[in-house]
Image (cartoon, grey):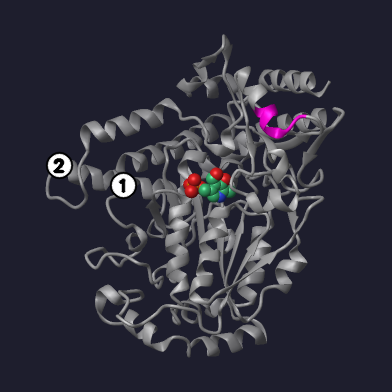
Amino acid sequence: MNYDVEYIRRQFPALSLQVGGQPAAYFDGPGGTQVPQRVLDAMVAYLVGANANAGGPFHTSRESDRIVEEARLALADFLGAGPREVSFGQNTTTLMFSLALALGRGDRDLVPKSGAAYRQGPATAEVGQGDRDLVPELGGAYRKGPAAAGGGRGKPGRRPGPGKRNEILITQLDHEANRGPWEDLQELGYVVREARIDPETCTVDLEDFAAKLSERTRVAAFGYASNSVGTVSDVKEMTRLAHQAGALAVVDAVHYALHGPLDVKDLGVDFLLCSAYKFFGPHLGILYGKEEVYRELPTYRLKVQSAEIPHRIETGTLNHEGIAGAREAVEFIADVGERFGLERNDEGGGPGGEPGPEVAGGLRPGQEAGTGPEGTPSRRRQKVVAGMKAMEAYEQPLAEHLREELAALKGVKVYGPPKGHPRTSTVSFTMENVPSGEVAAALGEKGIFVWHGHFYASRLVEVLNLEGYGGLVRVGLSPYNTEAEIQRLLKEVRRLSV
Ligand SMILES: Cc1ncc(COP(=O)(O)O)c(C=O)c1O
C-alpha cells in the first residue's frame, strides 16, 4: 500500500502542537479527531462569504442554502444514502433524543405502513394488525393537513405513548446516547429490555438479542462499533432480526464512522446517526433516516417548520459553518481515497481484516446523491469508500501490534473481541497496579493524549466491574498516528508497569 502518513499529517495543523517539549501524540480520536486545514478553510469561507439565515432572497442566504444542500449530497455519499435522508443537528445525542421522543409518541402508522417489508412470518403479520389499533386519536392528529401529514402537533389532553409495541431493546455494549433516550421513554410506559454482552469478548450476545425481540418491540437500538473497546457488531444481522420482529432498527455509528465505510442501504437500517467531529469535521450531528420511514416520523417541531424530510427533525437554525466543514471532511476522505485507496475499492474487507460486508457504492436506482449515472455510485462515493478502507488498512496493523505488545506486559489486560472478530483500531486496557486515571495522566504529562473512564459507555464498564478503577485506558488510532508514537506510548506504559 502506498499510504503516506506524512502526507496525511501535513493536512492537520494541530499536529504541530508541542507539549513539554514533545510533539503531541493524539490517541484521543474516539473522543474526536483533529481537523484538516481544508475543513477550517471551508468554515471560514462560509462565515466570510455566505453567513446568513436560510431561505432569503439575497446573495448570502442563497449561498448559505447552496452550501447546506451540497453538504447533504456529500454526507449522502458518505453514508450511501439519498440527500433527502440526511439531516443535521447539534450532535448525535441530541438527535437521538429527538428521534426517541418522536418514535415514543407511538405513531400507529409508522411501523405498519413502512414496515410492510419487515413483516415476514407470523409474528410480525399479527403485529401489523395489532398496531393499527394503537393510540388512534394520536394517529389521527398526525394525518390532518399538510403540516400534520405524517407527524404533527400534539392535542391538549392527548398523551403520546406505547400501544402493543411497548418495548425497546438496547444493549449493554452501547454508549449512553443510544440507551438513555430510550430509557427515558419508560416515563411514557415503555418497557426497556437490554441485550447482554459476553464480558470476556465484549461482544453482544446475539442469541440474547434475538430472544428479547418480539411482536412487542417497537425499536431495537444498537451500536455499530463500541467506542470503548472497538467491537464491531453484526449490524446487518441485528437489523434483519429487528425487522423480522417488525421493529425499527436505530444504529449509533458514531465510533464506526471513523473506521470503515458506511452503507446504510446495504445494512438496511431505518435510522443511523453519527457525528462529524469523529471523522475530521466540526461538532455536528448527522442523522440518516430511511425515506419511507422517516417521512412518517412524528417529530416534535415548530408549526412554522417544514414537515418535509430531511427538515422535519431540524429544529431552529442549523450550524451552517459546521455543515460546510462536515462537507469538507468528506472531501478530505475522498482525497485520501483518490491518493491511496482507489485500487483497493473492490477488495471488501471491514475493520479487523475480516471479510467485511460487501461495500457497494450505496446508491440505488432512484436515489439522487452524487454525480454518477442512476444506480451507480458517484465518483465521490467510490473515493470515500476507498479512503475509509485505506485509512483503516493503515491503522489495523498498528493497533494489532499495540495490542500484542500491551498484552505481553505483566499486569496489563487488553479488552475486546478475540483476534479475527471485526474491530476498530481502538485499543483499551487496564494495568493491575495503576488505576486507569493515573495511567492516562502519566501519559498526558508526556504529551500522549489518551482517554480513561467509561467514555459514556458506562453500562459496559459496570458489566466489566471497572467502575472503581477509573474504567479503561483507551488508545484510539486515527489515520495520522504513527508507529513512532506507538513506541513512545509503549515505552511509558512499560515504565509504569515495573
Ligand atoms: C459510540 C458513540 N455514540 C454516541 C456518542 C455521542 O456523540 P455526540 O457527542 O455527538 O452526542 C459518542 C461520543 O463519544 C460515541 O462515541
Identify whether 5 is placed above or below 222: above
Q: Which mark is residue 105?
A: none
Q: Position of residue 235 (x, y in %)?
A: 64, 59
User: In this rendering, would 373 be left or right of 242?
Assistant: left
Looking at the rendered structure, the secondary structure element under dot 2 is: helix
Q: Nearer the viewer, residue 305 or 310?
A: 305
Q: Which residues are magenta?
A: 434-440
Q: Main secondary structure of the magenta part?
A: helix
* Residue 60 or residue 136, whichever sits in front: 136
Q: Is residue 302 magenta?
A: no
Q: Where, quadrant-wise, is the N terminus in this rendering?
A: top right
The earlier-in-sequence mark between 1 and 2 is 2
Q: Amino acid at mark 1?
A: Val
Q: Residues within 10 Å of mark 2 (few under 14, many from 20)?
A: few
Q: Residue at x 41, y 88 (%)?
A: 136
Residue 152 falls left or right of residue 162: left
Please count the marks in the image.
2
